[in-house]
Amino acid sequence: MALPPGLLARGSWSPDQVEGRWSDAVYEPGPSVTRAADEAIGALHARGSPSHDGLSARLVSFEAHGDRLVLELEPVRWALRLSQADASQSMAATCVVRAHDGRWLAGRRAQWLATWPGRWALGAGGSIERGENPAHTLERELVEEWSVSARQITVEALICLPNQLVMMVGMAWLAEGDEVVPDHEHDAFAWWPAELDRWPPEADEPLRALAALLAEPRPAP
């Protein structure tokens, strides 16, 4: 059964409160989904993108509690996440990054990337590797994309997009004095103000909505 689009679960959870249970069986989509994935990865290669197909994660089901988030996962072809019609509950991780004073790290994604080319995004993000705990994906992507480690990382939300791509959203707080160094996936970066109403025009509505969700005060347990 397909997941309903929208917010599936709201944390926060520390990385050690997140459990990923992996199935050995690789998910097999239907012929139309497979064709869409073939066409999408072919289009990437045609425009010179070095993106490679492989195996990532698919969310089968989840249990969300105050002190625990359990994710039932199975391997899935990476290219399925490129489908605008049916990503088949493929998972991706987004690690929103904030400075010690509350500013938000934004990076403009390079034109060759498979998703959001040329657009601004918050922090780091990427696919979950086969067998990986998705909470650890947040830490790995932060180091790979920005060459920095966080003083604190939390898992904040599971969100299902209309095309059935599931986003696990985390938030990383850097220590005072930490410096970020962007990798080749970004051609520009900036620190946007802590106050969302002071963000620049390039901050589009999806980014503002995500930040507003993360900035909401959480009720006491």
Image (spheres, grey):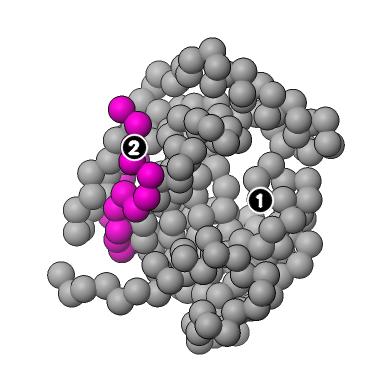
* Disc number placed over residue 106 in the picture, else none: none
Whole-percent x, y for residue 216 in the image: 34, 74
Magenta span includes 15: yes
Residue closest to the eye, 141 or 82: 82
Whole-percent x, y for residue 123 in the image: 58, 64
Whole-percent x, y for residue 116 in the image: 66, 50
Type of residue at label 2?
Leu
Residue 89 higher or lower than 154, as above or below: above
Residue 53 occupies which quadrant of the picture? top right
Residue 192 occupies which quadrant of the picture? bottom right
Task: Please give the count of numbered marks on the rendered protein.
Answer: 2
Residue 19 higher or lower than 110, as above or below: above
Identify which residue is drawn at 55% across, 26% down: 77
Q: Secondary structure at mark 2?
A: loop
Type of residue at label 1?
Trp
Quarter of the image that includes the N terminus: top left
Left or right position of 207 against 67: right
Instruction: Tell me if mark 1 has few (under 14), some (14-19) or many (20+) residues whose alpha carbon lies within 10 angstroms of its own.
Output: few
Q: Which residue is mark 2?
A: 3
* Disc number placed over residue 116 in the picture, else none: 1
- Residues drawn in magenta: 1-22
Identify which residue is drawn at 56% across, 29% down: 80
Residue 215 higher or lower than 143, as above or below: below
Q: Is residue 157 visible?
A: yes
Identify which residue is drawn at 65% across, 45% down: 115
Residue closest to the eye, 111 or 178: 111
Magenta span includes 183: no
Q: Is residue 131 visible?
A: no
